[in-house]
Amino acid sequence: MDPVERYLSDIGEIRATGAGTVETSYYPALSTLLNEIGKRPTPKVRCVIQLQNKGAGMPDGGMFTADQFRSKAAKQNAGANPLETLPPSRGVIEVKSPAEDLADIIASEQIARYWDYYGLVLVTNYRAFTLIGRTATGHAVELERFTLAATEAEFWKLAAHPRTCPDGLRERFAEYLYRAMTHNAPLAKPHDVAAILASYARDAKARIEHADLPALAGLREALELALGLKFEGEKGEHFFRSTLIQTLFYGIFSAWVLWARKRASTPAASTKEKTLKYELKESATAYRTDAKHFDWRTAVWHLRVPMIRALFAQIATPERLGSLGLAEVLDWTASALNRVDGDAFFAAFDEGHAVQYFYEPFLQKFDPELRKDLGVWYTPTEIVEYQVERVDAVLREELHIADGLADERVIVLDPCCGTGAYVRAVLTRIAKTLNDKGGDSLTAQDLKTAALERVLGFEILPAPFVIAHLQIGLLLETLGAPLNESKDERVGVYLTNALTGWEPPKEKPKQMILMPEFEQERDAANHVKQGKKIIVILGNPPYNSFAGVSPEEENDLVEPYKEGLISKWGIKKFNLDDLYVRFFRLAEKRITEHSGMGVVSFISNFSYLGDPSFVVMRQRFLEEFDKLWFDCLNGDSRETGKLTPDGKPDPSIFSTQWNREGIRVGTAIGLMVKHRGNKTSQPEARFRHFWGTEKREELFASLSAKKFDAQYETVAPTAENRWSFRPSKVTAAYREWPSLSNLCDIPPSLGVLDNRQEALICIDKEQLQLRASKYLDSNVPWDELSTVVPALVRNYARFNAREAREKILKTEPFNADNIRRVLVRPMDNRWCYYTSVRPIWTETRPLYVQQCWPGNTALVSRRTCNTSPEGPPFLFASTLGMQHAMHTDAYYVPLRLRLLPKRECAKLKSENGQIENNVQDEMFDDEKI
């Protein structure tokens, strides 16, 4: 049960007995709640009820950290109350009856004594809470307040029906208590600051979860128009609101960093209290602050992106988004930032690593589901710097641009810049080149000009966009080229969809955006797209899209990579919809068709190196570029199981001390260069492997090799090997041999797929029959099934458990003939209950199953090898076979075919939505059965 729901339930049950007292009987419920919430902080916080009288009275409770119970003083007083030597480090608690008014309790002399002695008091009447603490000058102040129920009657009603408490209210209450318990905790480490800000952010997100304001809809529309996409469905709505909150909190964090640095660099004589004024366009409200304390209403003007400042203005304006109550949460956030030990924080906060120090920890605690969906991964420094150094070298050696990236003619774009890692690395490389040439007084100006005009970044997510501006701005300060705040200078990183807007609209006029700052951002990005001759495109493109429906302009990008796949290459099943493929096509198009020369360097999924679906893509690269280098970084979970050829660990290149998980897919760095003029010779393609736990360091170290290209193996892509970029050691004659698919009358088929935790697969036939018969018996109630086939009463992706059962009960009864042998793994034959009624099985493959008749045999093989050497790559099966019967997907080739009448084929197609492997109707004959 949710801790807040349990708290209300416990109180309701105690009151229902009629035997409790108005105050003390409910202590256990409060203690249980606080102890449960107290498991989140590090160290954990525990509540102790009824403290000793230390001279100020007897508080009803105290909040201690777990280490206080384990301390030497506590051990020395074993059996005694720790308060003999250890005061509660997280404050004391004073509790009164729900009938009492919280304001009267706060004003009492008792609270004044507790506050004076302990410094922090959590005051509650069970239905409302407030935290009393100290100001910087030592005066008492009410910090944060939270109300579960405004009146006693409402509270008892809520306690009687705890499940009626809205999810948003419960979440906000839990976050409030977490912050109360950590208020006295030191704030010095970046990840601790990220944790407390994430708590405020969750409170803020809960406040807007179901808000429906015209201004919020207007903000959403402005963001959609600026980015050229739509937030659709439940996930899209979640994405929009979560993104809005993220942007606010990354904005306030960035503003605080800039404010703190500016204050630290200001002479002591000028830090006296001063008045800072600005006007919000809608409210013309002036705010006053002092230089010693951070105030978000004034400090956000340190942010150099007008659209982000406009967003904060919307939040602070009552007539706009003020009614959401976000300004209150931002006030609390500012107070928390004022408690940070700035010296200790900035000693640990490496400005070049804000991602792993703040961005990733914040997102993980704020919205871990969204972090996973977005695939927010920190690109290791070695990877970024390796790519930048290689691009710089290729510009010099292949395009004969002596200064490489520092040449003022070289325009660089990271089309998916995230938090700005590649933009920072390029600027750092430019600064090094300028300094190596004997930098003069103009070096700083040259560097700033590069940051403003020709080292560019596009980002579609507002939150990392804010962090990118922070990181790049701080870098320029460090390199002696700070942005001029009075001139409103900003770096060339724009919030936009990098895959659209490159051509002026031909038919429709430009859509106007109600928020002028958002329109300015869109127009500035389009000016870059339509007016700059880009020479270098590099970065780490996203692998998955999320919550957006892109326009046709984006979807049509990869059409050239599909031309001839079916008609020429016979590839009928392919997937070219991964976002990284679109970014490759964008880069190819801008460099080869528009600029006529340049360099592309992406780290991405490595599937394009040799997978059949990418044959046309590879052919185009060979036709358009002059030299190509591929660094295969491996680390794939499916093809190799993240193991090296000799069986040692081979983690993802993205696995770091901050993110040990990395990603599942294998990766590769592809670098391609196009020379000036028309191509006159065959392209040169080079390939090398990196394996093991040290490959990131080995990759970077390879830059120092005297003969860099000698580290690669030259590959020979040809039509016979489908223009593969992977090296292979086979004779020319081998290429002429027929493939398995050439020998088949119909294409090989994948086996059936369960994905229901083997609910209908069992080694014991009788046990399986019992499961299936009960599952298909309408007289067996749903609740009973949880003990028979628990995997089939759970919902999965694209599987609604109740609807699936209702469908099969209407479609077919239990049939003992459907119990048949199935190949699960080599030499592992079990029993399964097979039904073609979807979605009981994830993939039913009915046309393949039709060929699994008694006496028939299938050759089982796979399309790709998973190890080298791989051992026998095939086996024979005389039973039904599973898709995962081999290490990689298993394909089945029936040795004999029973041709189906077209009528039966059409029936199978209508029942299952499509025909597997694109088997065509002419393979089936009405006369031959």
Image: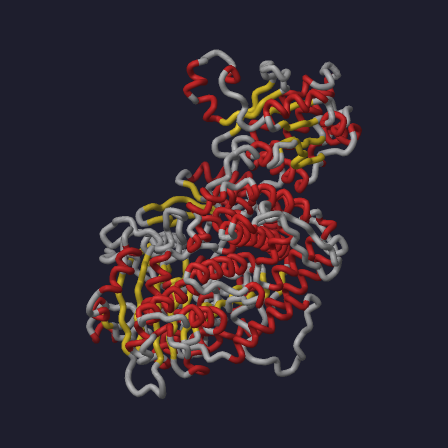
Which residue lies most toward the front here?
Answer: 269
Question: In the figure, residue 216 lies in which quadrant?
Answer: bottom right
Q: Residue 324, image x and y in percent?
A: 71, 49
Question: In the figure, residue 678 lies in which quadrant?
Answer: bottom left
Q: Residue 545, image x and y in percent?
A: 52, 61
Q: Residue at x 48, y 31 (%)?
A: 43
* Residue 268 vs residue 382, the one in the foreground: 268
Could you tell whether 121 is left or right of 39 in the image? right
Q: Residue at x 53, y 62 (%)?
A: 908
* Residue 756 vs residue 547, the one in the foreground: 547
**Is the residue 323 above or below the residue 559 in the image?**
above
Could you tell whether 640 is left or right of 704 in the image? right
Which residue lies most toward the top here?
Answer: 79
- Colour scheme shown: secondary structure
Q: Residue 928, image x and y in percent?
A: 45, 70
Q: Residue at x 52, y 34 (%)?
A: 185
Q: Is residue 160 visible?
A: yes
* Residue 370 vs residue 306, the one in the foreground: 306
Q: Residue at x 41, y 48 (%)?
A: 659
Q: Is residue 878 visible?
A: no
